[in-house]
Image: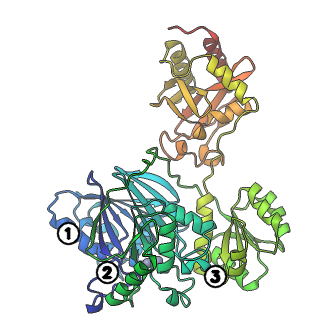
Amino acid sequence: MHVRFWGTRGSIPTPGRHTLRFGGNTSCIEVRTAADTLVIIDCGSGLRGLGQALTQGGKPVLKGYILISHTHWDHIQGIPFFDPFLPPANEWDIYAPKGLGQSLHDVLGGQMQYVYFPVRLDQMGAKIRYHELIEGDFQIGDLRVRTQYMNHTALTLGYRLEADGATLVYASDHEPFSRHLVSGKGEIRGQDRRHCEFLTGADLVIHDAQFTLNEYASKIGWGHSTVDYAIAMSREAKAARLALTHHDPLRTDDAIDEIVTNARDDQRNMLPALEIFAAAEGQSLELRGRDRAVTSNESTILNTPALATPLLLMAVKDPAAANTVREAAQADGITVLESGGVTAALNIARSVQPSLVILEWEQGDVDAVEGHKWMDVPILFVANEETVRAEKAATDWLIRPFSTAYARTRIRACLLRTACRWERVLTSQNEEQRLAVLHDLKILDTPAEERFDRITRLAASIFNAPMALISLVDRERQWFKSTYGLDASETSRETSFCSHAVASQDVLVVPDTFQDPRFSDNPLVTGAPRIRFYAGCPIFVGANCIGTVCVLDNRPRQIDTDTVGLLHDLAALAAIELSKPQAH
Ligand SMILES: [Zn+2]
Ligand SMILES: [Zn+2]
């Protein structure tokens, strides 16, 4: 994996004789894999130079992917000057965090409105596709990408890229969740632990390190890290190299040298060795990967949540903090329900199903934490730094004092992280017995047979549906004995609709998956085959439900009781065939 820095400066471009060596352009990194997949991380002013280099290469058509951490100006201001966006033959895919309001296209177009810039985003000739991300994994060509929210004043994603056996993590802009960690010392817990895990085993971590420890004291809540924190996280994550980036605009080349020298001196005898350097504009690196277990190749599907109107339930006594939360929620059109105390709030939560609960941490309020566990609703606790430091409970904190912008970011991250409405697998009570009966049939993984295909053909025809299946629900998967109109032999049980029918041992009809909280964010709904309608009837062998006959459609629809009766008939036919000896 080839990496080149085109911009390393934070906040604003700072050209001049004091920034010649590390560069004055804002964040932009070029990544290329062995298969020549081109990925650009962030579009600060460094993007202009990269664009020129790309067009000078003389390649007739350019195709590339752009990952934007967040849309603060220093991370997108290069876009209007990016030449490869002009030729109509070029194709670009832009990825950035999904917001709660404006679309990504509109946010990026905003800085190119007539009053700011002579050319509008839509007037640039290239084909540009926009993708909005939450936390998850996805694949770009031969690259596997993982995203995770950073702790910043705007909703920001870090990116973990894996290809050619090498791993690169980009973690900027980010501030330590727990302020005691700014010194790089102390136990790494909770959300900082999660951040650290995101960097695990990276060959190169490119990390926000805008401030020194001394400077940080007056920059709390600005959304940036100290050099010490970046080092501590990378070390704990057993990363091989750390590139300090997002250099403060006031930082001269000499000052950066001094920071690096001091950091190296501090770490000199520590093992395993961590190579520390400051990212410099123009610098190129080759990541070859180290000897370690190959990471799994399976790709999980990144869901775009179907957000209902979010409801925030809060019980915060501190008037200043409560007011800030209120303002933050209001800015994103989130409904706020307030309650006098923690216990009352948790009682209300049982009946109203909030999307997020914000509570003021009360000494020894074990109930609140326990409540957290059963409700499956994220809880943010408002507390002081000292409390957070002393409290062992693994929970999400909103550390006082906090700004409206910061509260907004945390609320958004919580909502988007948990907004996936999709109920996972249900297992039936007699699961082991059911599986034994299924396995005894010795039908799993056998070739297709006309006697079953006949049934799915009939099902599709009766329901005038494009897809029909005989689905057998195994321990970890649903395997299809017969498929009509679907090109798959099995899917994971986690996404299985039929599992629900099997667990309830009853007909399951989902007229419109978009409207059904059990399925609206199921990957089979948000992605191929884009199931919009489902009707499945259990197949029983003896008293055991082993699968279903089901019909699927890409459009929502209604079915009447008579038609459900026909589905019963088809399931009964399938059961008869299953209990016969194998034809081959
Ligand atoms: Zn920035
Ligand atoms: Zn920023």
Q: Are marks 2 and 3 in contact (CB under 8 Å)?
A: no
- Residue 501 placement (x, y as % from top left): 68, 32
Residue located at (36% from left, 81% from top): 9
Mark 1 or mark 2, earlier in chain: 2
Residue 112 in the image: above or below residue 219: above
Nearer the N terminus, badge 2 or badge 3?
Answer: 2
Residue sitting at x 57%, y 77%: 185
Residue 224 % position (x, y): 50, 79
Q: Ligand 1 sits in which quadrant?
A: bottom left
Find residue 402 and name its label.
3
Q: CA distance from mark 2 to mark 3?
A: 30 Å
Taking the image as shown, residue 190 lies to the left or right of residue 487, namely right
| Location of mark 2 (residue) | 25
Of the 4 image quadrants, the one containing the N terminus is: bottom left
Local packing at callout 2 (Cα closer than 10 Å; few below 14, some 14-19, many 20+) is many
Q: Specify the amino acid type for callout 3.
A: Phe
At label 2, which amino acid type do we have?
Asn
Count numbered badges in the picture. 3
Quarter residue 508 falls in: top right
Q: Which residue is mark 1?
A: 53
Q: Is residue 434 left or right of residue 134?
A: right
